[in-house]
Image (cartoon, rainbow, N blue to C red):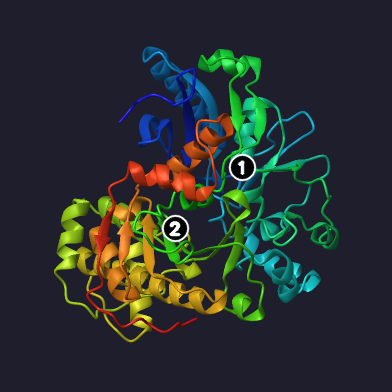
Amino acid sequence: MSTSWNGADGGVFAAVDIGASSGRVMLGRVSPEGVLLETVHRFPNGVVERDGGLRWDFDALYGEVLEGLRSAATVAAVQGETVASIGIDTWAVDYGLVDRAGKLVAQPYSYRDHRSRAAVAPVHAKLDPARLYETAGLQFLQFNTIYQLATEKHLDGLQALLIPDLIAFLLTGVRRTEVTNASTTGLFDAVAGEWATEFFAALGLRKDLFPPLIQPGEAFGNLLPDIAAAVGLPAETKVVAVGSHDTASAVAAVPAVATGDSEGNFAYISSGTWSLVGLELRHPVLTEASREANFTNERGVDCTIRYLRNVGGLWLLSECQRTWAGEGFQPDLAALLDAAATLPAGGPQINADDPYFIAPDNMPERIRAAVRRTGEVLPNDPAAITRCIMDSLAAGYARTITAAERLAGRAVDVVYVVGGGSQNALLCQLTANAAGRPVMAGPVEATALGNVLVQARAAGAATGGLPRLRRIITAGTNLRRYEPLVTVRPGYVQ
């Protein structure tokens, strides 16, 4: 495959892709044969206890972004290339507060902090949950931005910037709110595609608390001169809005044309720290039944709707690994999954998206306690606990897909698993079994691929809508297919 951009000047695209536990900066080279990604910088991320709560060490995070851009500039220069633009995606809902001078007034809170719990009832006293859903179409999660903001005491003179927009602001000096992430705040009109200004008024929030909206593919602006000099990039280097909610970028890279399935008749699972499970639609589903099932309607690239539910994720396993490591036991992940695969089906399960599992703690014991509450017993054995996690995630995925089909009136023929979970053969096979449909696994780097392709299209290096972008993805992706060994599809359980 060609390693250069198919544009005229040999440009490449820098994807800043940050998750809740790690981040990386990657260079993307686009050709008709696919997208070639090169990781130029990796760094850890995580919450820290500071100033009475769980926060992100944003100063350190931003420093890593700058270091990654330096590496991108160096690698591109060595290969005779230029960095055409930069795109940024991160997790959703969290924000930083900046003053009029652009100074970040405190390290941003993490959604894993418990502070927003107390704000749920006061918010619902002012805005009926049914009314919230009719407009925003957002899944109820106690850490949604709307509840976090309700805990803030001093917002005068401050502006809220969602995490990827905060990074873009520091790079360019331009304040905007990218629309796919705006749709996760609870303050966004899912039909109009604009801020729900009546919600701001009801909660006593300024209508300009967030900056104006920007669409994927539009440019924030060029790098600030001092930033460009510090990282070794030309001052004309653009920062381009992508699907800045990492799931929006991941879903844009779902290779749904690869197996000939009819457009739209697929479900996706973006599997990582969290699992996002759902359908891609053209219009939101704002019914009372959808609200009761706790589905969300979030914006995707090209004004699509990501109709999905959060179903917990591999956070459960990574937290177990962290606890076991603290106890002096550090099993190889592949060996652990192999051992779990040898255990018989039908073992105990948990509700993987229970808020009980959100905060970091002794995860193995919490999982065993949750199993005990169901009247079953889970041995204190890493393989058994791992199998419980995998079975529980697969069952949750299958229930969510079945519910999405019913609520959206859309049949699903195939399920695509993208992200880190696509490498987990046990999870993919169990998902195929539980869903009763084939699972197509890959690409692993879906988020970065979606990020790069939106930049490439903005630069003219790729053209067309999502189907054409996805053909570029499939050209360079080896997918693995898992056929269901069990064909009975589970009914939906709330």
Q: Left of 434 or right of it: where is 229? A: right
User: Mark 2 belongs to which amino acid?
Assistant: Trp
Image point (43%, 41%), residue name? 449
186 relative position to 419: left or right: right
Q: Residue at x 51, y 79 (%)?
A: 406
Q: Is residue 187 visible?
A: yes
Which residue occupies the foreground of this view, 330 or 436? 436
**x, y percent for residue 391:** 30, 72
Q: Quadrant of residue 364?
A: bottom left
Of the residues under marks 1 and 2, which one precedes in the sequence?
1
- Quadrant where the N terminus sits is top left
Q: Residue 202: percent from the left, percent from the top?
A: 84, 63
- At which x and y percent is residue 122? 75, 69
Does residue 478 sit above or below 81 in this rendering? below
10 Å neighbourhood of mark 1: few (<14), some, or many (≥20)? Answer: many
Query: What residue did someone put label 2 on?
Result: 274
Question: Real-space Cα distance between discs 1 and 2?
Answer: 23 Å
Image location of residue 120, percent across then percent down: 68, 68
Residue at the (36%, 30%) spot, across then down: 38
Query: What residue would you read off at disc 1?
Result: 216
Label for residue 69? none
Residue 19 in view of the camera: no
> What secondary structure is marked by label 1?
loop
Q: Mark 1 is on which residue type? A: Pro
Q: Please state if 343 lies on the left or on the right of 277 as rendered.
A: left
The quarter of the picture where residue 392 lies is bottom left
Q: Is residue 245 above or below residue 379?
A: above
Quarter holding residue 460: top right
Looking at the picture, does residue 447 appear above or below residue 124?
above
